[in-house]
Image (cartoon, helix red, strand yellow):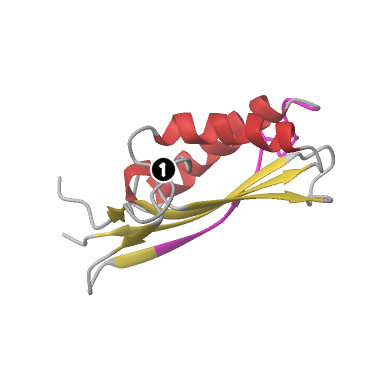
Amino acid sequence: MPRAVSLIRSASLSDVAEYAYAATAPAGARLIFLAGACPLDADGATVAVGDYAGQAAQAVANLRTALGDAGAALEDVISTRVLVASSRQQDLVTAWQVVRDAFGDHDVPSTLMGVTVLGYSDQLVEIEAVAAVLDS
């Protein structure tokens, strides 16, 4: 199935970043703006309390569900922002590794940010995303 998202890698910038530096979608693609995916279970309880990797995994699972409900998949994501409630770089990296691994070769442009607090009790991770799909 053809995808709307084209990832752009720059030979002029460092290859240290584990994501493409830019992405495009053609005119006419339908954009999907997703609310931040949170580490909540079906009952609205925060899962994996105190566990950055566990919360990142649940947030990715919830992101997949929201994408599916919108007629898209992870491969349709054009950019992400990963928010981690911590001032420790290692906590950010722990959450990022889960997100990066979930996206695999579809290494979309991403921003990883440490924040002071997130909206739900015991929440450590949230993933914002934008996707683009070609309408059939």
Magenta residue span: 32-49
Other residues around mark 1 within 10 Å, as few (<14) / some (14–19) / many (≥20): few
Q: In the image, 32: left or right of 81?
A: left
Q: Tag 1, which secondary structure?
A: loop
Instruction: Evaluate whether residue 42 shows in this view.
Output: no
Q: Residue at x 75, y 35 (%)?
A: 45
* The image quarter in which residue 95 lies: top right
Q: Quadrant of residue 26?
A: bottom left
Tell whether position 22 is magenta. Answer: no
How far across and how far down the image is residue 113, in percent?
A: 67, 51
Q: Is residue 125 left or right of residue 98?
A: right
Residues 53 and 72: in front is 53
Q: Position of residue 40 (x, y in %)?
A: 68, 37
Q: What type is the residue that disc 1 sits on?
A: Asp
- In this orientation, which residue lies closer to the viewer: 87 or 95? 87
Task: Please tell me which residue is depicted at 45% across the width and 31% down the height of the picture.
Answer: 102
Instruction: Provide residue 36's location: percent of width, then percent of height.
Output: 61, 53
Q: Position of residue 132 (x, y in %)?
A: 33, 60
Q: Is residue 43 located in the magenta-colored stretch of the structure?
A: yes
Magenta stretch: dominant secondary structure: loop
Q: Which residue corresponds to mark 1?
A: 15
The C terminus - image quarter? bottom left
User: What is the quadrant of the N terminus in the image?
Assistant: top left
The residue lying furthest to the bottom in this view is: 27
- Pick the residue in front: 107 or 119: 107
